Amino acid sequence: MSATRLLVLGVVRMYGKAHGYQVRRELLSWAADKWGNVQPGSIYHALKKMTTEGLLEQVEDAEAGGGPDRIAYRLTEDGETEFLVQLGRALSSDDATGYSLSAAVTFMPTLPRAQVLALLKQQLANMEAHAQSTHYAREHAVDLGKPPHVSELYRLWSVHAEANVSWMRDLIGRLEAGEYVMAGEGADDEAVFGAPPK
């Protein structure tokens, strides 16, 4: 699963139509190159690849004037489906790097609260299992035939895993308490971050 793919689809969806430069500028303003491993060149590659896959379509943009970036992109019906599928997977699936989950959290308000909570609870179960396995490895490194100092590596992983579990439990609690505006809530979906323009 690619964080870049999800983020590019999400930004194009959010704007309704967007130029490659606009997508790049938006993602870099979010520092997605750091927390999502999104490189500027990969954004343009993703736009072209998803266009050939039928997830995006190119549209002329009269507003662009005489500039070089006159082609904009918008999601196709298949692109909308792909965005929602990728978002759901990234919210619930085990992600060793954290890039996909970070991308998914960015766009989680575009889904209904109950759906997000169900997906995040699956993610929490994955995180808890990972935390248990790293704790076991830390406690039994020598028994597993590892040099004694390797337990420090397992200790590092264990601390990170426990922090992830704590953060996820907190996020779930805040969502259950009604924090953030999610899809289908409020007077209209325009208040929902990432919702397409009406």
Image (tube, grey):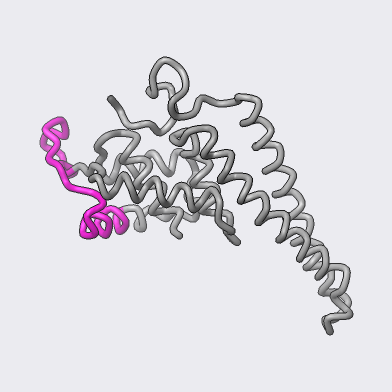
Q: Is residue 32 visible?
A: yes
Expressed as whole percent of the image width and height from the top left, the position of residue 122 reads 61, 50
State the quadrant of the C terminus: top left
Expressed as whole percent of the image width and height from the top left, the position of residue 131 reads 75, 58
Q: Is residue 154 above or below residue 174?
A: below
In this orientation, which residue lies closer to the viewer: 35 or 129? 129
Q: Is residue 132 above or below residue 190?
A: below
Which contiguous range is marked in magenta? 44-71
Counting the numbered discs, the total is 0
**124 relative to 77 in the view: left or right:** right
Give residue 133's quadrant in the image.
bottom right
* Residue 135 located within the stretch drawn in magenta: no
Expressed as whole percent of the image width and height from the top left, the position of residue 182 reads 49, 28
**180 relative to 188 in the view: left or right:** right
Which residue is painted at 72% across and 59% down in the image? 129
Q: Is residue 187 above or below residue 180?
A: above
Task: Kindly give the residue lying farthest to the bottom in the view shown.
Answer: 145
Expressed as whole percent of the image width and height from the top left, the position of residue 71 reads 16, 44
State the quadrant of the N terminus: bottom left
**143 relative to 97 in the view: left or right:** right
In this orientation, which residue lies closer to the viewer: 26 or 68? 26
* Residue 58 located within the stretch drawn in magenta: yes
Q: Is residue 34 visible?
A: no
